[in-house]
Amino acid sequence: TLFRSHDLMKRQCTGCPGMITFYIKGNLEHSKRFLQSLKLFALAESLGGYESLAEHPAIMTHASVPAEDREILGIGDTLIRLSVGLEDVEDLIEDLDQALKAAHQHFEFRN
C-alpha cells in the first residue's frame, strides 16, 4: 500500500495523535496561567512530536506578526493549540481539566 507505515502504526499503537485549537475563556493572563498549569503537556513551538505539546501562538510562533494582523487571522491572546500525543487519554483529560480550573480559579475575583 501507499502508507505502509500506517499499517505498522495500527499494529503498534492504540490511537493516533491529533491537533486541537481552541480559545480559552478570559484574556492573556488566563492563557498564560493555563499553560503554566499543564503537567503532561510540554510547552513547545514545534507541535510535531509523539508527546503532547501545547503552544500559545500569539506570544510564540506568531509573536513577530503585528497584533492587528494576528487579530484578522484569529490569533488572539486566548488562542491555544495542542498537539495530542500518545499518552493515556484519561491522563490528558485530567491534565487539561486541572489546568483550566487553575487558570480561572486564580483570576476568578479579578475579572
Image: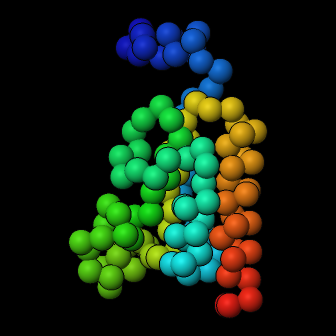
Residue 77, image x and y in percent?
47, 76
Q: Nearer the viewer, residue 16 or 111?
A: 111
Q: Quadrant of the C terminus?
A: bottom right
Q: Quadrant of the N terminus?
A: top left
Above-or-below relation of 93 to 107: above
Above-or-below relation of 72 to 81: below
Q: Residue at 42% x, 10% y: name it.
A: 4
Q: Residue at 30% x, 70% y: name it.
A: 63
Q: 46 left or right of 55?
A: left
Q: Residue furthest left?
A: 64
Residue 79 in view, yes or no: yes
Q: Residue furthest bottom?
A: 110
Q: Nearer the viewer, residue 10 or 47?
A: 47
Q: 69 left or right of 89?
A: left
Residue 19 in view, yes or no: no
Q: Residue at 66% x, 70% y: name it.
A: 103
Residue 9, image x and y in percent?
52, 16
Q: 108 left or right of 76?
A: right
Quadrant of residue 10 in the image?
top right
Quadrant of residue 97 in the image?
bottom right
Residue 83, image x and y in percent?
50, 45
Q: 100 left or right of 12?
A: right
